[in-house]
Image (cartoon, helix red, strand yellow):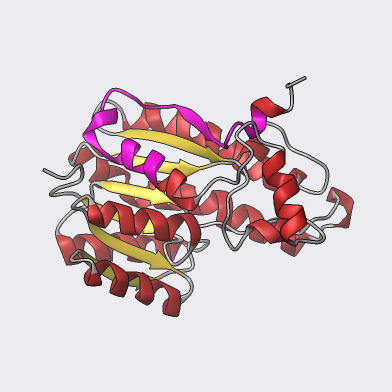
Amino acid sequence: MARLDNKVALITGAGSGMGRAASLLFAQEGAKVVVVDFNEENGKKVVEEIKAQGGEAAFVFADVSKAEYCKGAVDFAIETYGKIDVVFCCAGVPQKAKMIWELDESEFDRVMAVNTKSSWLMAKYSALELKKNHGSLILIGSTAAIRPRATQGLYGACKAANNNLAIGLAAELAPEARCNCINPGPTATPMLPTFVQTYNDQVADEIAGGTLLKRLVDPMDIANAALFFASDESRSITGVSILVDAGADKARGKN
């Protein structure tokens, strides 16, 4: 028996990076996957990949920074598959590498809306369904939430908010459902180059060298952590934030 047999999973930001990896893995483990993304082409490609490997999936377009789209995605999942057991809020956008005083209000609003407001909106519209099905809500934070750095202060703030939101949601979803948060370190996704002024192979090697394990995190590493939280194996774990960062956080204190 697969780890997510008979479960329906809704994943935002599922068209690329960590969301795509989680969509493919969840489907391999038996879940019916609702692929949610702003990029219709990418989202539909993921659905095709899932179907090609024998899984079941459906795509829904959504701008998860807006309430009507989040509600629509939840409604679509229930109408299509009859229920929702897992929601993985994986949608995210980077902060441009700028000091706080260099950011304008529109940049602030966009980063907070996609990275934090969307998690709240998805929780708002899926909470009662997750409680009914003893489900699991999974949020995405970042090591930047724990150790923010110059030019990424806003990004760190929104990810710290997700960590705290997960604790509050865990209390509100209890005792029927759970909520946890994953904090990725430097991950080899299309978003990684946007965090630095210049990105090339040498910079990638330097970033990897700053971790204890001397490698970038793979999107599938995040997907595996999400799979654990989505499965019944983590049924006694809620309100927890974990690091999946190749030891990047602990490397800062290494002599």
Vertical placement of residue 44 versus 172, above or below: below
Vertical placement of residue 161 versus 115, above or below: above
Q: Quadrant of residue 162?
A: top right
Q: Residue at x 71, y 60 (%)?
A: 194
Q: Quadrant of residue 238?
A: top left
- Residue nearest the observer in this picture, 183 or 1: 1
Residue 45 screen position, x and y as percent: 37, 75
Left or right side of 209 for 245: left
Vertical placement of residue 134 versus 236, above or below: below
Q: Residue at x 84, y 49 (%)?
A: 100
For this orientation, the residue located farthest to the right is 101
Left or right side of 58 for 194: right
Q: Residue at x 20, y 46 (%)?
A: 4
Left or right side of 234 for 222: right
Residue 109 screen position, x and y as percent: 68, 58
* Tally of numbered tags: 0
Residue 14 screen position, x and y as percent: 42, 62
Quadrant for the C terminus in the image: top right
- Residue nearest the observer in this picture, 198 or 157: 198
Quadrant for the N terminus in the image: top left
- Residue nearest the observer in this picture, 69 or 36: 36
Residue 234 screen position, x and y as percent: 29, 29
For this orientation, the residue located farthest to the bottom is 41
Decide whether residue 234 is among the magenta residues: yes
Residues rendered magenta in the picture: 224-249
- Residue nearest the observer in this picture, 141 or 47: 47
Q: Residue at x 62, y 60 (%)?
A: 191
Decide whether residue 115 is among the magenta residues: no
Left or right side of 80 for 241: right
